[in-house]
């Protein structure tokens, strides 16, 4: 440790965070696409000039990008040449420290007084990057080229001037190209804001002081994480999670998570997982590693985020499994779906060791729904990308949250008013998925039901969701949460259910057709037969469960508006 004044250290730490937060806000406020401006599917950060190691990330950034952006920035650094102030690299290649093709990364070298000091980078989810279907979530893709345009690190901006030739290549290979320029300029502008704020921070405290604080903050984050890991008993732990299918072969994919804890280190082994799959549920290694990072950060949220946070986490490359995708394996579902199953496997493994800190599995799916077509009223094409919430798992001290965001981020469903204003659809229903909370002494939270009605024209719908085969895992004797469901209604009658439960692509819909989605509930925590009968009665009164479900799930008999105590005692005795 150094002799940095602790007040100065705290102020510089907050200053670095503020730089990232202002980049986040600039990006959100200027972006054109609702998936960025409303759903908040993006992130900004500061990275080390030599290896891309994370220095700071905005509070509003997606947790899954914490790891991937430092790996992605490292890949840019390896390939960067003849750097000048104002240069900005664009890259979305998933095999180069990325996620899927729709997550487009910008990286800008940050110079202070003529010398390279750090890199500023951000990621934004573009609503379309080409490929087989609008939105890029190609549930049946068997190679990455079918998923969209893949960009290696190239300079989109050279000394602050956009390269029109590179831009024309990009726009010629994606849908709704005329609407992308707003997002591109917003993404670049966020980095300019970061450069100004970071320069002001360095001007105020000096290069040497800020550099020393960065080193100190990294060391302290590692120290804090090691202190938390030390509370886990030494030993070996095992957890398993399942992906419904890969979208092509209708068979589940296994994530086999072995965790060895020794002293203040955790070692992760996923070599027992399923082999590479044909469909788009393969995960690139950057996303696999980042998924482990975010899972541990969920368990120890008080530890600040930088590269030191993850130094005690040692992840063996799961080569030969679907968790280490290599070209040309398709990967559109890796960040949005597989990442959450990886985190779920970590939770399942460590819950017995940390029952007071952990919880039953959350819904664990982003519920990726893409709809693309042309609006006959405006004559313009559109691509709608919609994510949805689900139930959180119950935990030692309480029931799970209903309609919470996904495990990997803070993204939220786009407001219905914005959706209906921008696209030729109507949201006819948005409600709790009643009965979906997993039974437990502390029940899981509930997912949601929503119905999308097509108002005008024809469109193609695609789904890359999960937990349609089995619900999120219960913990400590709790039961699994309710499953995800998708159904297309035509002419007022149920007409189509995806053969892969929650995954399909290019489903043609037209005016009057409806798409019904129900998202998973969280798993239950603890023995359901120990749940307070009064809490079960309140749930039934609120419509969360029926009286029949109360008896079947919790052994509580409801008679009228009261608990039948004698019948409940008899039922619980079995």
Image: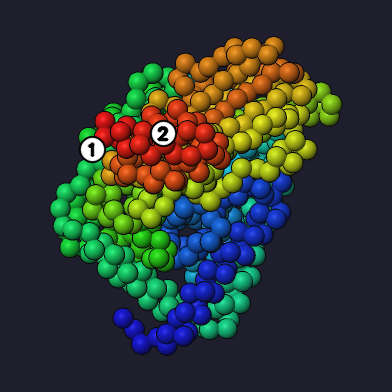
Q: Secondary structure at mark 2?
A: loop
**Label 1 crowding class (10 Å Cα cut-off): few <14, some 14-19, many 20+?**
many
**Label 2 crowding class (10 Å Cα cut-off): few <14, some 14-19, many 20+?**
many
The outermost residue toward the front is 566
**Quadrant housing the C terminus:** top left
**Quadrant housing the N terminus:** bottom left
Q: Could you say where residue 12 lies in the image, as x and y percent from the top left?
A: 50, 78
Say left or right for 250 vs 434.
left
Say left or right for 292 vs 34.
left
Q: Could you say where residue 138 lies in the image, as x and y percent from the top left?
A: 52, 26
Q: Secondary structure at mark 1?
A: loop
CA separation, marks 1 and 2? 46 Å
Nearer to me, 521 or 45: 521
Q: Is residue 372 visible?
A: yes
Nearer to me, 159 or 504: 504
User: Mark 1–mark 2 contact, CB under 8 Å?
Assistant: no
- Residue lying at 60% horizontally and 67% vertically, measured from the top left: 195
Q: Could you say where residue 541 lies in the image, as x and y percent from the top left?
A: 54, 39
The outermost residue toward the right is 377
Q: Quadrant of residue 216?
A: bottom left
Nearer to me, 157 or 532: 532
Q: Earlier in the sequence, mark 1 or mark 2?
A: 1
Q: Which residue is mark 2?
A: 557
Q: Nearer the viewer, mark 1 or mark 2?
A: 2
* Numbered circle sitting on residue 350: none
Q: Is residue 447 visible?
A: no
Say left or right for 78 vs 256.
right
Say left or right for 65 vs 513.
left
Q: Is residue 447 above or below residue 209?
A: above
- Residue lying at 73% horizontally and 42% vertically, measured from the top left: 418
Q: Which residue is mark 1?
A: 271
């Amino acid at each position: 440790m150094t002799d940095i004044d602790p007040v100065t250290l705290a102020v510089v730490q907050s200053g670095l965070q503020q730089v990232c937060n202002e980049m986040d806000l600039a990006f959100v406020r200027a972006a054109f696409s609702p998936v960025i401006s409303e759903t908040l599917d993006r992130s900004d950060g500061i990275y080390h000039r030599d290896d891309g190691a994370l220095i700071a990330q905005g509070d509003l950034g997606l947790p899954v990008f914490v790891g991937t952006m430092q790996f992605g920035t490292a890949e840019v650094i390896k390939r960067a040449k003849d750097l000048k102030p104002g240069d900005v690299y664009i890259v979305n290649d998933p095999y180069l420290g990325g996620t899927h093709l729709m997550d487009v990364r910008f990286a800008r070298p940050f110079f202070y007084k003529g010398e390279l000091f750090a890199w500023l980078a951000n990621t934004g989810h573009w609503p379309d990057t080409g490929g087989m279907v609008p939105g890029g979530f190609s549930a049946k893709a068997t190679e990455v080229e079918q998923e969209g345009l893949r960009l290696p690190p190239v300079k989109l901006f050279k000394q602050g001037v956009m390269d029109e030739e590179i831009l024309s290549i990009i726009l010629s290979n994606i849908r709704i190209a005329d609407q992308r320029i707003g997002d591109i300029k917003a993404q670049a502008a966020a980095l300019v804001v970061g450069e100004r704020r970071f320069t002001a921070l360095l001007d105020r405290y000096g290069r040497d002081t800020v550099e020393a604080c960065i080193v100190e903050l990294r060391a302290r984050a590692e120290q804090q994480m090691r202190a938390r890991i030390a509370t886990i008993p030494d030993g070996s732990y095992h957890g398993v999670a399942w992906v419904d299918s890969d979208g092509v072969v209708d068979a589940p994919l296994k994530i086999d998570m072995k965790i060895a804890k020794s002293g203040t280190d955790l070692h992760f082994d996923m070599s027992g997982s399923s082999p590479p799959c044909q469909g788009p549920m393969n995960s690139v290694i950057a996303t696999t590693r980042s998924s482990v990072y975010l899972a541990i950060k969920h368990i120890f949220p008080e530890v600040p985020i930088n590269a030191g946070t993850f130094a005690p986490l040692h992840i063996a490359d799961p080569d030969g499994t679907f968790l280490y995708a290599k070209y040309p394996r398709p990967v559109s579902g890796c960040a949005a779906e597989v990442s959450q199953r990886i985190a779920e496997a970590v939770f399942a493994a460590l819950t017995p060791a940390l029952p007071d800190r952990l919880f039953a599995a959350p819904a664990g799916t982003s519920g990726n729904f893409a709809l693309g077509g042309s609006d006959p009223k405006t004559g313009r094409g559109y691509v709608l990308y919609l994510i949805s919430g689900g139930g959180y798992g119950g935990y030692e001290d309480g029931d799970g949250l209903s309609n919470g965001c996904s495990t990997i981020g803070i993204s939220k469903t786009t407001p219905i008013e914005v959706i209906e204003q921008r696209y030729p659809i109507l949201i006819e229903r948005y409600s709790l998925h009643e009965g979906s909370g997993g039974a437990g002494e502390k029940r899981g939270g509930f997912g949601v039901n929503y119905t999308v009605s097509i108002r005008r024209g024809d469109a193609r719908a695609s789904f890359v969701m999960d937990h349609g085969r089995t619900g999120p895992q219960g913990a400590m004797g709790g039961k699994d949460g309710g499953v995800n469901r998708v159904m297309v209604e035509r002419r007022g009658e149920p007409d189509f259910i995806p053969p892969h439960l929650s995954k399909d692509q290019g489903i043609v819909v037209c005016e009057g057709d409806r798409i019904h989605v129900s998202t998973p509930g969280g798993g239950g925590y603890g023995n359901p037969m120990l749940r307070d009968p009064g809490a079960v009665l309140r749930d039934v009164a609120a419509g969360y469960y029926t009286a029949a479900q109360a008896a079947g799930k919790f052994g509580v008999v409801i008679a009228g508006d009261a608990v039948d105590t004698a019948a409940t005692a008899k039922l619980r005795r079995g």
